[in-house]
Amino acid sequence: MKTKSSSSDYSFIIAAGGHGTRFSERELKQFMSLNGQPLWIHSVKAAHMAGIDDIILVVPKECINQEYTCDIKIKLVAGGSSRPESVMNGLMASSKRFALIHDAARPLISVDLIARLIANTDDEHGCIPVMPVSDALKHITGPQVKSVPRDNLYATQTPQSFNREKLIAALRNNMQVKDEAEAWLSADCELNYVTGERENMKITYPEDLAFAEKLSHERRIIRTGIGYDIHRLIPERKLILGGVLIPDSNLGLLGHSDADVLTHAVMDAILGACGLDDIGTIFPATDERFKGADSLDLLREVMKLVNSSGYRVEYVDSYVKAQVPRLNKYRDEIKASLSKFFAFNLKFKSGENLDDCGAGLCMEAEAAATVSKQKV
Ligand code: MG
């Protein structure tokens, strides 16, 4: 039966179990960093963005107990002594009808390529990304040099997409393969292909990593957002700023939650930068759940939304405008409180005895956030 597939039918297996020494004698390349994150994480993100929820990372056996910090749920699997063995271990740990097998050394994989592979895979047909060979080819044995016509020759990329059970059967019969497509073809299964992507390059040598960094910087989206908030200052309320209780204030801010004016402005700046709804929409004042809420708990929720939108908060700058009380001595503590979430800066402005803020009736806060995301 030729069942068309969708991303929810897929396991995504990242082969990061290799010990290749072409890259470095000392360090395994799958753990080297690209844009501050290990190579394998980039593929996890692309799979997640493509809507795949069964993501398996196959790592060298001796690295299985290392810490793998990742916001996205992954299954860790110990690799075998060869690539096909590692892939097989990944396949046995996966659960979906189809599997995409990807090489961690190709971190610049795009969501679009994953979608095109899925669209061209069914139970009968696997699908691989291929690129035409552009260099002229020579076959060299010792002193003998022969030209090889490159017509109809293609280089194969990953991910490669297959019905999982059929791939397991094909690999069982042929574990001496360079890639999964080779096992698939040797089992007489049919194979579709789509055009791969130049950016989906394989990082083999150290200079490849520098080139990939350059490429990925060009693919970064950077956005800024602004946030503003104001709360009335009244007696007999706690004054909380950036999650810090200001102990010696007989005035506090009035609001449905803890009325942390600074954290509110910061959240709106971040959400705005990510193109998400504002806090008034996400945590409505009419909702009893948020009555007296700790704004740092709300910020934790916001950070989850930011993560799942694929953005990363790079920096937040802010100021609080307050005539009373004098806040400068709390600056370091407040700054440290929000710096646990992201790089954060804070200033204070007095109200210069002007307007409502200057009259000590309210406090205001403004924030600007910069976020970034990798285009996938
Ligand atoms: Mg507010």
Image (tube, grey):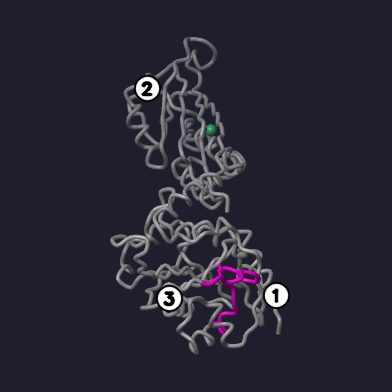
| Residue at point 45%, 56% (across, down) | 71
Pointer 1: what residue?
4
Circle 2 crowding by C-alpha within 10 Å: few under 14, some 14–19, many from 20: some
| Residue at point 66%, 67% (across, down) | 194
Q: Is residue 325 above or below residue 224?
A: above
The kind of secondary structure element at disc 3 is helix
Three-letter code for the amino acid on which mark 3 is drawn: Arg
The kind of secondary structure element at disc 2 is loop
Q: Earlier in the sequence, mark 2 or mark 3?
A: 3
**Residue 327 shows which numbered tag?**
2
Q: Residue furthest front?
A: 143
User: In this orientation, which residue lies closer to the viewer: 20 or 216?
Assistant: 20
Q: Is residue 302 left or right of residue 61?
A: right
Magenta residues? Answer: 146-167
| Residue at point 37%, 41% (across, down) | 340
Pointer 3: what residue?
83
Q: Quadrant of residue 69?
A: bottom left
